Amino acid sequence: MNEKFETHEHDVLIIGAGGAGLRAAIEALGQGATVAVVCKSLLGKAHTVMAEGGIAAAMANVDQADDWRTHFRDTMRGGKFLNNWRMAHIHAHESPERVRELEQWGALFDRTSSGDILQRAFGGHTFKRLCHVGDRTGLEMIRTLQDRGVNLGIDVYMECAVTRLLKDGERVSGALAYWRETGRFVVFKAKSIVIATGGIGKAWRITSNSWEYTGDGMALAYDAGAELMDMEFVQFHPTGMVWPPGVQGILVTEAVRGEGGVLRNKDGERFMERYDPDKMELSTRDVVARAIYTEVREGRGTEHGGAYLDISHRPAEYVKRKLPSMYHQFRELADVDITEGPMEVGPTCHYMMGGIRVEAETAQTTVPGLFAAGEAAAGLHGANRLGGNSLSDLLVFGRRAGLSAAEHAKQSGQVTIEAQDVLEATREMLEPFERPAGESPYDIHRDLQETMHNYVGIFRNEDDLKKGLSELDSLKARAEDVRVEGSRLFNPGWHLARDLKAMLTVSEAVALSALERQESRGAHSRIDYPNYNEGWSKQNNIIARGEHGMQLKQRSTEEMPAELQRILEGQ
């Protein structure tokens, strides 16, 4: 190994410091492994914080009839039965235990009068199932996990971005990263790697996701030979802020609807009656998002192209107590008092159901020693995720990924890193500085977001998707010649040039998979194929790296055992 690079050696390297990454770190430490957590941003600034509504777990504190079977059934139904049923089964079983563990570690939940954790209703869930802390649940979860991890002694490398996974033969052996502040390279040597980098929202123009969400982990895994799955299923959250422009896309939690918020169009109609008369505002996210989109498209949208979400009919003190973050968010950012009038909301690119293909029990990818958990991993949510399942997903599969990564590290011999691989990876990173001419990464990123917004959005059709893919081809060619000015010292243009490569990879995977799936299911809506197609009901799209670029194949979902099948058929 070349000595000129700063090098750190650990048993387990975890990329990403959100709920899944921190839970994996805590578990791996508990197994006696040495653990490094690398995060692109600051510790505590994870997307987990934005999950406001609650953690879905069948604890039956409010509705005694709830149990893991109903949670399993709701998750499978929400995912339109494309879910990895083993993951859905594990998740429904283990979520209550993971929530109790969080409570033991110091998480403060809202309480019932008898002192149990309070649970609220949420879209797609049969019972009141979301354990919550007002509308700041994700924040409390991160605070708790972070305190626990820091007390146990995890090594955290902040503002450090991983650019390539390194391999020793077929297995992973480490990663090359760089410090965002100085631009200096750093090598991590590890026997196991867990990817917990979240989603891909920054490839779209309107998104609830922050600047970090550029699909890094999925692209790193793909480049290292892992498979991606279900990439067509991108969830558009029905309610993001639409005004003013500076806050466009920022999330308005589903808890507003869970606490009684009503959606109306510009004519004052409660339009969800047309789309799901039974569940109304608490229908699944794909249905509500398409309903708002349709109202706007048919001319019944609000002034800024959205819908009104109104909770002002509830007492002001109740709203401030139950939804403190929403109250302050609208007060400070949009000058709107939500206790007195409606919010203006519209669909925003929010969550990725697809991602890296993993085994249900171990969270291992198709590459030995490489694991993935949380939003970066596919399988649990199928074609559409239910609200609140993301936080329990992080806890359940973050723990399993950490456990498996530590066990793999224990059984592994020493790994080696080839100096040549490191030099090649650094050379690739420095090329944008050396080009005498080329395009700005900002221009290419803007065009990428427009392309995904226009051609690979909420509604799709064959012509648009083909146009989108051809645009992506030309954007990839342009990105090959991207040029960056200045030094490596905190250079945002250089950071974006690297993120662009990841966003182009995941965008192509989304568009290819969306073109292939000739039906509408869950979050994937084809105008030219508006119905379910039975032929697709048990098929996952798998994306892998081939000799000539990206390759797509189908893989049948596993046959479900009869006893689980009976649970699904139960009413």
Image (tube, rainbow, N blue to C red):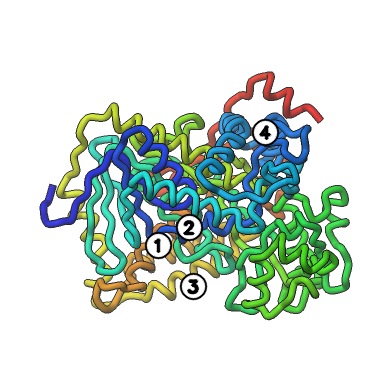
**Quick check: 19 left or right of 416?**
right
Residue at 69 percent of width and 69 percent of height: 327
The quadrant holding residue 484 is: bottom left
Mark 4 or mark 2: name the one nearer the start of the chain.
2
Residue at 72 percent of width and 36 percent of height: 60
Mark 1 or mark 4: name the one nearer the start of the chain.
1
Residue 341 location, x and y as percent? 80, 74
- How dense is the environment of label 3, judged by Cα within 10 Å: few (below 14), some, or many (20 and up)? few
**Quick check: 178 left or right of 208?**
left
**Quick check: 562 left or right of 220?**
right
For disc 3, the marked residue is 446
Residue at 44 percent of width and 75 percent of height: 443
- How dense is the environment of label 4, judged by Cα within 10 Å: few (below 14), some, or many (20 and up)? many
For disc 2, the marked residue is 46
In three-dimensional space, the C-alpha distance between marks 2 and 3, rounded to whole angstroms, equals 24 Å
Residue 438 location, x and y as percent? 32, 75
In three-dimensional space, the C-alpha distance between marks 4 and 2, rounded to whole angstroms, equals 27 Å
